Image (cartoon, helix red, strand yellow):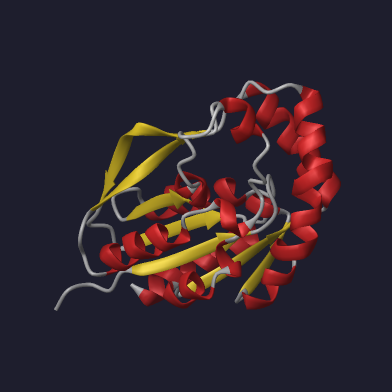
């Protein structure tokens, strides 16, 4: 009998601590068992558009993602197959030629802002966790991350936050929290929640 593959979904606003929580779980359970897949890898490939047009896309709307491909990959991983996950460049707003091969893990952690807005993705998940963090805290974290890691200007980050990030949070992300099994305040620093999640994963394994 093959071991069940557990899919754990972590959703929540941008810069709410999803990656921190995912990495903390990996460190606690051992990386040979666990793999993290980011929803960001599945942004649609817009390489046919000039950079100026790619910059104008609303990347916080469900339509910006290729959720169908993500669903297909998660189904294959659930069945023990390997898949090639796309690599996405946030600075260029396009998919890169390189891919990342993933397969053979007993726990798949999927993290992203809009995972719970898609019923087909929600249904695949054994545990659904929503990260709750005040929007002003998320904005400060996002500013630090996007300016340093993604080489963007402060003005462009603030403009995007006002025009798409905050409105899309209110329209899609926050309402999707009702599909969560667990809502975690304070993100990856919430050690009580992390211990509870790790205990539940061990129980499922």
- Tell me if residue 94 comes above or below residue 33 in the rendering: above
Residue at 58% x, 26% y is 51
Residue 90, image x, y percentages: 55, 32
Image side of residue 136 versus residue 174, left or right: right
Residue 151, image x, y percentages: 63, 20
Residue 59, image x, y percentages: 63, 46
Residue at 75% x, 47% y is 165
Residue 83 visible in the snapshot: yes
Residue at 55% x, 28% y is 50
Occupied quadrant, residue 3? bottom left
Residue 133 visible in the snapshot: no
**Quick one: quadrant of the N terminus?**
bottom left
- Tell me if residue 57 comes above or below residue 194 in the rendering: above
- Tell me if residue 196 comes above or below residue 32 in the rendering: below
Image side of residue 51 versus residue 71, left or right: right
Residue 102 versus residue 184: which sits nearer the camera?
102
**Quick one: quadrant of the C terminus?**
bottom left
Occupied quadrant, residue 174? bottom right
Residue 27, image x, y percentages: 44, 47
Q: How many marks?
A: 0
- Tell me if residue 18 comes above or below residue 128 in the rendering: above
Occupied quadrant, residue 171? bottom right
Image side of residue 160 versus residue 149, left or right: right
Residue at 30% x, 55% y is 33
């Amino acid at each position: 009998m093959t071991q069940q593959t557990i899919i754990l979904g972590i959703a929540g606003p941008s810069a709410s601590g999803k990656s921190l929580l995912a990495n903390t779980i990996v460190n606690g359970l051992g990386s040979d068992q666990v793999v993290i897949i980011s929803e960001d890898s599945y942004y649609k490939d817009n390489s046919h558009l000039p950079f100026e047009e790619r910059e104008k896309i609303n990347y916080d709307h469900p339509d910006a993602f290729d959720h169908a491909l993500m669903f297909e990959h998660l189904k294959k991983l659930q069945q023990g197959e390997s898949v090639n996950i796309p690599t996405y460049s946030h600075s260029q707003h396009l998919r890169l030629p390189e891919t990342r091969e993933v397969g053979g893990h007993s726990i798949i952690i999927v993290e992203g802002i809009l995972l719970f807005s898609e019923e087909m993705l929600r249904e695949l998940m054994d545990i659904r966790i929503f990260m709750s963090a005040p929007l002003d805290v998320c904005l400060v974290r996002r500013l630090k991350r996007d300016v340093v890691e993604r080489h963007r200007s402060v003005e462009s980050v603030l403009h995007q936050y006002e025009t798409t990030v905050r409105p899309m949070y209110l329209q899609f992300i926050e309402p999707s929290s009702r599909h969560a099994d667990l809502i975690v305040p304070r993100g990856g620093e919430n050690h009580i929640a992390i211990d509870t999640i790790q205990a539940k994963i061990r129980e499922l394994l």
